[in-house]
Image (cartoon, rainbow, N blue to C red):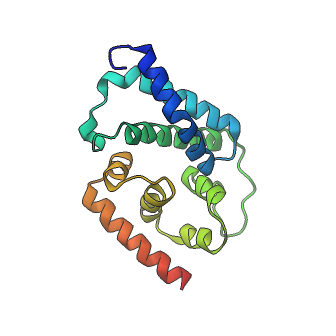
């Protein structure tokens, strides 16, 4: 694919697009956004295939692909939030939720969703990437631009906070 082999790209798409669509739908119920993110992701992969450095995400092309898709999804949420008219402010509540919080709210509800919502944003991001998105520590570190040790520490702190909140 890095040498412009269209058949290799089609094979990658055939193998990964069903999985990618399911993962994106877990984070976003809007089919139009999912379709746009899929298209943007595979276009970016085609254009950047020569730049793929397997060592950056532990050699995982799927991890690299998901990192691109997750970033594109967050960009789509941010664009939508930027263009949406803010709702009237309720007393003591934020006017527009962050894109990540919106994605999380559509994925997880109930007591678990409430507990996740109370986590510090940096802990919630790590937990979301590792648990909801199924990324490894290394993939999460690449996605969030953090050292692996920081990801491990935040994941541990997030799990402890979740246990305490749900006890």
- Residue drawn at x 61%, y 31% is 36
- Tell whether 154 sits left or right of 100: left
Q: Quadrant of the N terminus?
A: top left
Q: Nearer the viewer, residue 11 or 31?
A: 11
- Residue drawn at x 33%, y 40% is 60
Farthest residue, direction right:
88
Q: Nearer the viewer, residue 98 or 51?
A: 51
Q: Where, by quadrant of the figure, is residue 6 drawn?
A: top left
Q: Position of residue 112 (x, y in %)?
A: 59, 71
Q: Position of residue 143 (x, y in %)?
A: 38, 46
Q: Where, by quadrant of the figure, is residue 65 drawn?
A: top left
- Residue drawn at x 61%, y 71% is 114
- Residue drawn at x 31%, y 64% is 152
Q: Position of residue 73 (x, y in %)?
A: 55, 41
Q: Quadrant of the C terminus?
A: bottom right
Q: Position of residue 159 (x, y in %)?
A: 43, 73
Above or below residue 118? Residue 60 is above
């Amino acid at each position: 694919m890095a040498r412009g082999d269209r058949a290799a790209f089609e094979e990658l798409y055939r193998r990964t697009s069903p999985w990618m669509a399911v993962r994106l739908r877990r984070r976003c119920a809007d089919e139009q956004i999912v379709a746009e993110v899929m298209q943007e992701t595979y276009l970016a992969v085609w254009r950047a295939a020569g730049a793929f450095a397997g060592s950056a995400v532990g050699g995982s092309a799927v991890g690299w692909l998901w990192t691109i898709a997750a970033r594109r999804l967050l960009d789509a949420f941010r664009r939508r939030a930027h263009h949406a008219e803010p709702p009237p402010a309720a007393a003591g509540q934020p006017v527009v939720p962050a894109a990540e919080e919106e994605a999380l709210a559509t994925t997880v509800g109930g007591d678990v969703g409430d507990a996740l919502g109370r986590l510090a944003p940096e802990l919630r991001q790590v937990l979301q990437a590792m648990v909801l998105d199924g990324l490894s520590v290394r993939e999460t570190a690449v996605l969030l631009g953090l050292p692996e040790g920081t990801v491990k520490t935040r994941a541990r702190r997030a799990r402890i906070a979740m246990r305490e909140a749900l006890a």
